């Protein structure tokens, strides 16, 4: 039984008791309380409906986000790495090299396949700007 159905039952019960809502203070009080309960019941039903609709919208958004994640974060190898790494191809044998924080701190990465070691130089050389003399 929903809240609205319970309030309707209570209202019918009060009407069946033939309460005098005109002259009796108690009758007026009960009538006002039932009116408030009707409004509260309708508000709760509206909130429950809004909650249901929002839940459905969240499910749709979650599915859409999962699709976007599968495209953006295409998990080819199925391996679970931290976010602080990147992969590059070994110049010697072509196997993937994993560059993580540990390799960056050491400044050296070694290919697990061919064993070749590479130093990591992360310094950025800025190109010199060329300036032209302006003629008047």
Image (tube, rainbow, N blue to C red):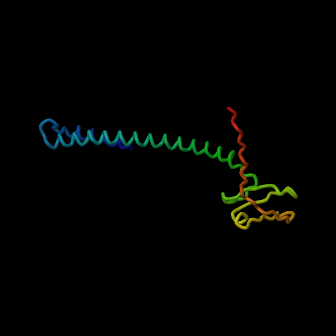
Circle count: 0
Q: In this view, does 93 lie above or below 40?
A: below
Q: Which residue lies furthest to the top in this view?
A: 136
Q: Residue at x 75, y 60 (%)?
A: 121
Q: Residue at x 53, y 41 (%)?
A: 57
- Residue 33, position as x, y percentages in the image: 24, 43
Q: Is residue 2 left or right of residue 53?
A: left
Q: Which residue lies furthest to the left in this view?
A: 23
Q: Which residue is drawn at 36% across and 40% down?
A: 43
**Residue 111 falls in image quadrant:** bottom right
Viewer-closest of 59 and 110: 110
Q: Quadrant of the C terminus?
A: top right
Q: In this view, does 49 lie above or below 127?
A: above
Q: Which residue is drawn at 65% across and 47% down?
A: 69
Q: Residue furthest front?
A: 136
- Residue 36, position as x, y percentages in the image: 27, 41
- Residue 22, position as x, y percentages in the image: 14, 35
Viewer-closest of 48 and 16: 48
Q: In which quarter of the image is the N terminus?
A: top left
Viewer-closest of 60 and 105: 105
Q: In this view, does 59 lie to the left or right of 27?
A: right
Q: Which residue lies furthest to the bottom in this view?
A: 106
């Amino acid at each position: 039984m929903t809240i609205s159905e319970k309030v309707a039952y209570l209202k019918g019960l009060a009407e069946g008791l033939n309460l005098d809502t005109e002259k009796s203070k108690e009758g007026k009080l009960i009538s006002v309380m039932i009116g408030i309960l009707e409004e509260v019941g309708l508000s709760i039903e509206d909130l429950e409906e809004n909650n249901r609709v929002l839940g459905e919208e969240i499910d749709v958004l979650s599915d859409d986000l999962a699709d976007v994640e599968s495209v953006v974060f295409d998990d080819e190898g199925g391996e679970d790495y931290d976010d602080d790494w990147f992969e590059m191809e070994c110049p010697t044998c072509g196997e993937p090299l994993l560059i993580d924080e540990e390799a960056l701190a050491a400044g050296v990465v070694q290919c697990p396949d061919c064993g070749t070691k590479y130093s990591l130089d992360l310094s950025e050389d800025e190109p010199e700007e060329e300036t032209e003399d302006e003629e008047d």
